[in-house]
């Protein structure tokens, strides 16, 4: 785990990174976008922490209800938390992406001219 000050710095750095990516969001949606960016930044930093924990301790652990019972392998709570937070992060990013203006030029199919050549050749 990272300390509180370092975590705040990392979250602020991530907020700046995301804000620079989503600068084209229309002004009327900026307030909503700010909240999503904040949540996404917080979640991404927590995901990094959980990834480090999972890399060290793994996804499963041996668990026993009592000393008399033989331990069995179970999913660690951190693995469940990671999966939940990853799903939330992806939702935040999708919502932010959906707020971006649709680029009319991106819908046009770019061509190198080969299709036009083939189509023109077949008309004769």
Image: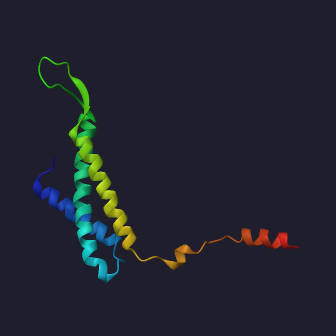
Q: What residue appears at the point 20 percent right and 65 percent down from the top-left corner?
A: 12
Residue ranking furthest to the top: 68
Q: Name the image colouring.
A: rainbow
Name the residue at 31% across, 82% down: 27
Classify residue 108 by image quadrant.
bottom right
Q: Between residues 7 and 101, which one lies in front from this camera angle?
A: 101
> Which x, y percent locates residue 45?
23, 55
Quadrant for the C terminus in the image:
bottom right
Q: Position of residue 9 (x, y in %)?
A: 17, 61
Q: Horizontal and vertical percent for residue 88? A: 29, 56
Give the residue at x 26% y 40%: 54
Give left or right: position of 117 versus 8.
right
Please tell me how many numbered marks the rendered image carries.
Answer: 0
Q: Is residue 107 above or below residue 83?
A: below
Which percent across, then down, holds residue 107?
55, 74
Name which residue lies at 26% across and 50% down.
48
Instruction: Judge whether 17 appears above or below 53 on screen.
Output: below
104, above or below 114, in the image: below
Which of 107/3 is in front?
A: 107
Horizontal placement of 78 versus 95: left or right? left
**Hey, which quadrant is residue 66 in on the image?**
top left
Q: Residue furthest bottom?
A: 27
Towards the viewer: 1 or 65 = 65
């Amino acid at each position: 785990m990272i300390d509180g000050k370092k975590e705040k710095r990392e979250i602020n750095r991530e907020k700046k990174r995301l804000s620079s990516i989503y600068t084209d969001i229309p002004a009327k949606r900026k307030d909503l976008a700010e909240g999503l960016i904040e949540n996404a930044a917080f979640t991404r930093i927590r995901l990094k922490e959980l990834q480090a924990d999972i890399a060290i301790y793994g996804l499963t652990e041996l668990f026993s209800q009592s000393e008399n019972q033989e331990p069995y392998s179970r999913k660690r709570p951190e693995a469940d938390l990671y999966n939940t937070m990853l799903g939330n992060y992806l939702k935040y990013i999708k919502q932010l992406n959906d707020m971006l203006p649709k680029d009319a030029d991106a819908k046009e199919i770019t061509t190198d001219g080969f299709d036009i050549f083939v189509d023109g050749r077949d008309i004769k």
